Image (cartoon, rainbow, N blue to C red):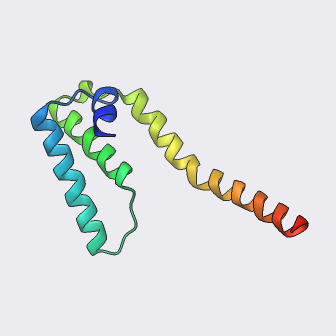
Amino acid sequence: IVKTMGTKITKLNAVSGSCASMGGAITLGLATLGGIPVSTTHTITGAIIGVGAATDVKAVRWAITANLLVAWVLTIPAAGLIAAIFWYIGTKFL
């Protein structure tokens, strides 16, 4: 994931990749301590965006980042809708 995200969102090198990994790990640790459920993929992606933006705001491919955000927002309701459809089918035929 880091390799893919590190080439599509922004270009990472060894230092920036390590900083993104550490930032993601610290975020996950703090969320865990706070009892907050978070996605590891979302945290590392956010860390990669942060490293890219810290290097140069223009280094981040914001169109790809926007597509990721839209996909993340739509994932929960889409999964809920699909689950509801299968629940309905299951209760009618099983």
Quadrant housing residue 4 = top left
Which residue does the image show at 85% across and 69% down from the upper left?
91
- Most extreme residue toward the left is 15
Residue 8 left/right relative to 57: right
Q: Is residue 47 above or below residue 52?
A: below
Between 19 and 53, the residue placed more toward the observer is 19
Give the image location of residue 92, x and y in percent.
90, 66
Which residue does the image show at 48% across and 34% down from the upper left?
67
Quarter of the C terminus within the rendering: bottom right
Give the image location of residue 88, x and y in percent.
82, 64
Residue 66 left/right relative to 89: left
Quadrant housing residue 80 = bottom right
Between 94 and 23, the residue placed more toward the observer is 94
Which residue does the image show at 15% across and 31% down from the upper left?
55
Quarter of the N terminus within the rendering: top left
- Most extreme residue toward the front is 94
Between 25 and 91, the residue placed more toward the observer is 91
Give the image location of residue 75, x and y in percent.
57, 49
Give the image location of residue 6, x and y in percent.
27, 32
Q: How many numbered discs sit on the rendered protein?
A: 0
Residue 83 left/right relative to 32: right
Which residue does the image show at 42% across and 29% down from the upper left?
64
Quadrant housing residue 28 = bottom left
